Amino acid sequence: MGLALISGGTRGIGLAVALSLKNKGYKTVVCYSKDQAAALNAQKLGLEAVKCDVSNPDSVKSLSERIEKLYGGVDVLVNCAGVSLEQKVVLDVTLEEFNHLFDVNVKGTFLLTNAIIPLMLEKGGSIINISSIWGIDGGACEAVYSATKGAINAYTKALAKEFAGANIRVNAVAPGYIDTQMNAHISEEDKLEFVSNLLIKRVGTGEDVANAVTFLIENDYISGQILRVDGGMI
């Protein structure tokens, strides 16, 4: 099946995606920034875990050189590394917080994608960016996070056009509320209120997102699309 590289692939959505692709037969490499315990757990699950700070150009270059040396090319790239803030009005967001979100969510996706595309040029590939419904609809008290994911959506559509001639497809998945560590700060009351407004009355799982990622990888007539996985938000 080839090689799949998943950033942020040792926890939450990224881990679910990595395990799904491993089960599909891909050699699966996940990169992580800090959580050594999560990396060890990923290795126990049969994944290769490599430390990489996607917001650091030198770290990304080191990862891509390692991938090229060991495997030659990449068939699938899933940009899943991302950070968020606790919900607060934009007036309370500091410049440091703003920069951190854009460094990881946007610059990190840019750096890793730019490093890996050359490893796809020979035979093509599939790039999936993990976005968010807030990148489409905008989320109150999530303004900066929404802005980073909106940027990812625009970047996805532009890249799909740029690299169509190289047989590289680029799509994004925009999850709604997913039960992950990133959303652990949301109160039970807010969770129940959110779910009450969905057509499908439950919180999403990492596996729900992984299924969408796999769908986009396997369907080679789809590119430049943002697929919502949100339980039917209305």
Image (spheres, helix red, strand yellow):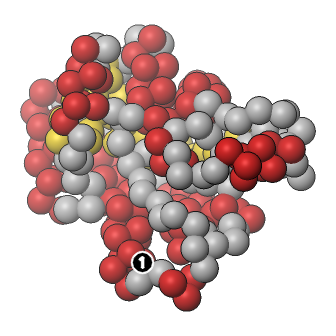
Q: Is residue 59 left or right of residue 179?
A: left
* Residue nearer the viewer, 195 or 14: 195
Residue occupied by mark 1:
98
Q: Quadrant of residue 37?
A: top left
* Identity of the residue furthest to the bottom in this view: 91
What kind of element bears circle 1?
helix
Residue 161 visible in the displayed image: no
The residue at the point 34 percent across, 70 percent down is: 100
How crowded is the residue under tag 1: few (<14 C-alpha within 10 Å), some, or many (20+)? some
* Residue nearer the viewer, 215 or 190: 190
Figure check: 110 above or below 62:
below
- Residue 140 x %, y %: 70, 71
Q: Is residue 74 left or right of residue 69?
A: right
**Image quadrant in which the N terminus is located:** top left
Figure check: 110 above or below 211:
below
* Residue nearer the viewer, 154 or 102: 102
- Residue 178 x %, y %: 62, 40
The residue at the point 86 percent across, 44 percent down is: 196
* Residue nearer the viewer, 49 or 84: 84
The residue at the point 38 percent across, 85 percent down is: 95
Amino acid at circle 1: Phe
Q: Is residue 202 left or right of residue 118?
A: right
The residue at the point 36 percent across, 42 percent down is: 8
Q: Quadrant of residue 66?
A: top left
Q: Is residue 208 left or right of residue 82?
A: right
- Residue 51 x %, y %: 17, 41
Residue 20 visible in the displayed image: yes
- Residue 82 x %, y %: 42, 54
Number of numbered discs: 1
